[in-house]
Image (cartoon, coloured by chain):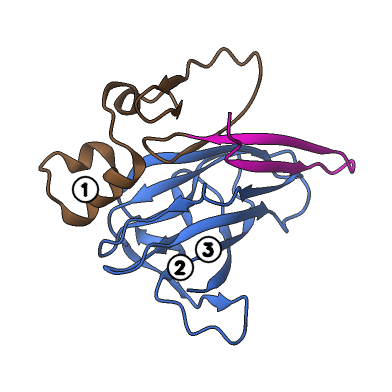
Amino acid sequence: MGRYAVVHQTPAGTNLPIINVTGSASIRCKIYDLIIGSDANPADVASEFNMIRTTDVGVGGTALTPAPLDPLTVAASGSAKGGTFTTAPTTGAVLLMIALNQRATFRWIAAPGSELITSAAANAGIELLSVGSTATPNINATILWEE
Amino acid sequence: MKIGGYAIWSLPDGKMIERDTIQCVHCGGHWVVEPGSKQVRGYCTKCDGPLCGQKHCLEHCIPLEQMLDMIERKSRSDYYVFT
């Protein structure tokens, strides 16, 4: 069991996945920390983000390397991909909805035992999705999980 | 009610908006607590916990752990309803 972080940056837009975290057939990833911000020039851009279940990994995207928070931890069994995807992962239930102005930064921390949990099924995961945005600023996101 | 998480918006003027989030005992989703939002939520007396208000959470008592098991085993033909 260990704790891992992935970071990624990609433009916001309409139904654009930012980061998709997937477990494996034997691993559930428990997402307990999420940070969303933007390094683009400050502007009043209204965006909506969702943490949402996914049932496949989509096509394309950038493979991200989960970084162990403790250097002595073994490599993560879970995996992550960042946008932009050629075909976005198939989405399911919304687990967290976030409205955010580009000038602001958002952080969400789960209470112990209340994490967002991926199912231990092949390619099932949870993604940070840019649902809609009035422009396409660069979005910087960090997701921390335990497995 | 048990607090499921904590959300923080850091605004450019240096101010911060801080809100608790509560977790649905059926789907595992969180929502930001906004008193007076008029959002209709629910409560499951079997699970003894809050519900997010989504239709499938209100109509079916399938605890989060059971739902994850269902996805993992794919034992139900209608499991996509809950994913």
Q: Which amino acid does label 3 sit on?
A: Trp
Residue holding disc 1 = B70
Res B64 → quadrant: top left
Rendered colour, chain A: blue
Q: What residue type is labelled 2?
A: Glu
Q: Which amino acid does label 1 sit on?
A: Met
Q: Which residue is drawn at 58% across and 69% down?
A: A5
Marks 1 and 3: same chain? no
Q: Which residue is drawn at 43% across and 28% down?
A: B48
C-alpha span from label 1 to label 3 = 22 Å
Residue holding disc 2 = A147
Q: In which quadrant will I find the C terminus of chain A? A: bottom left
Residue A144 % position (x, y): 57, 63
Residue holding disc 3 = A145
Residue A10 % position (x, y): 56, 61
Residue in front for this viewpoint, A97 or A129: A97
Question: Which chain hosts label 3?
Answer: A
Residue in front for this viewpoint, A137 or B1: B1
Q: How crowded is mark 3: few (under 14 residues within 10 Å), some or many (20 or more)?
A: many
Q: Which residue is drawn at 69% across and 54% down?
A: A38
Q: How crowded is mark 1: few (under 14 residues within 10 Å), some or many (20 or more)?
A: many
Q: Residues within 10 Å of mark 2 (few under 14, many from 20)?
A: some
- Which chain is brown in the rendering? B
Question: Which chain hosts label 2?
Answer: A
Is residue B6 shown above or below A24? above
Residue B72 % position (x, y): 23, 56
Residues under numbered marks 3 and 2 in contact, where contact means CB atoms less than 8 Å apart? yes
Helix, strand or loop under label 2: loop
Helix, strand or loop under label 1: helix
Marks 3 and 2: same chain? yes
